Image (tube, grey):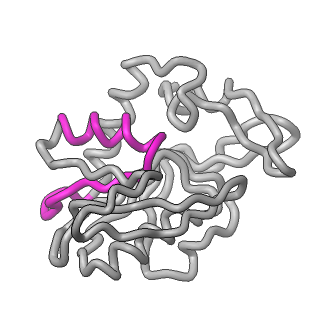
């Protein structure tokens, strides 16, 4: 059994404001992230994502950073981190991020019109973050070549009504206090 699947089956579940949330090294940094798990995930992303014409990897802070950094190191594609802090730099674009359990303002720097980007994140759940990011990237005039998430929590999400087909490595659900693997090869 691959490490991603095994680690999800062992993930504890917590409830936050009625939202059932699994605690996992990729999405939370708890328990600690083993290098072998990160390596497995990066190899799967590189095999699944359309990287041929990508100029930049774009990821929202914070939990997409470690995955995207590792993909950047393996592919030599530069990385842009969307931050929760405003810097006021020229070309900075603000976006509102809403998830199942929080709402934040985020800021994109270093993405320009015509840039070809891979949007990469840890988990696709409500789709709120990814939808806000894709809208901001469209506003900038960037070409979103591909959208990937390591883990998808099954159910409707805000990207369902868009033209973006998110590629995922594994799809899960939370049932009766535990993670259930719905599709161990993800989407896309």
Q: Quadrant of residue 134?
A: bottom left
Residue situated in front as seen by the camera: 150 or 86:
86
Q: On the picture, is 166 further left or further right than 6?
A: left
**Is 59 included in the stretch rendered in magenta?**
yes
Q: Residue at x 28, y 37 (%)?
A: 69
Q: On the picture, is 14 further left or further right than 32?
A: right
Q: Percent x, y for residue 4?
A: 51, 31
Q: Percent x, y for residue 21?
A: 73, 42
Quadrant for the C terminus, please: bottom left
**Is 183 included in the stretch rendered in magenta?**
no
Residue situated in front as seen by the camera: 80 or 45:
80
Q: Residue at x 47, y 52 (%)?
A: 84
Highlighted magenta segment, given as a residue range: 50-73
41 lies above or below 143: above
Q: Residue at x 82, y 44 (%)?
A: 175
Residue situated in front as seen by the camera: 98 or 30:
98
Q: Residue at x 46, y 60 (%)?
A: 106
Residue situated in front as seen by the camera: 29 or 184:
29
Q: Residue furthest front?
A: 88
Q: Percent x, y for residue 135?
A: 43, 77
140 lies above or below 21: below
Q: Number of numbered discs present?
A: 0
Q: On the picture, is 169 further left or further right than 15?
A: left
């Amino acid at each position: 059994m691959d490490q991603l699947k095994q680690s999800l089956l062992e993930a504890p579940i917590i409830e936050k404001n009625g939202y059932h949330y699994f605690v996992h090294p990729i999405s939370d940094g708890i328990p600690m992230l083993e290098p072998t798990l990160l390596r497995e995930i990066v190899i799967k992303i590189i095999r699944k994502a359309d990287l041929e014409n990508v100029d930049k990897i774009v990821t929202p802070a914070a939990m997409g950073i470690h995955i995207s950094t590792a993909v950047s190191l393996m592919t030599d594609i530069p990385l842009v981190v969307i931050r929760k802090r405003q810097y006021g730099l020229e070309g900075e674009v603000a976006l509102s991020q809403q998830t199942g359990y929080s709402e934040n303002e985020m800021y994109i720097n270093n993405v320009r019109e015509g840039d070809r980007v891979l949007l990469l994140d840890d988990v696709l759940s409500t789709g709120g973050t990814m939808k806000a990011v894709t809208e901001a990237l469209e506003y900038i005039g960037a070409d979103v070549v591909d959208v990937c998430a390591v883990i998808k929590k099954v159910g409707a999400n805000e990207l369902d009504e868009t033209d973006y087909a998110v590629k995922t490595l594994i799809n899960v659900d939370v049932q009766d206090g535990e993670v259930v693997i719905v599709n161990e090869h993800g989407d896309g």
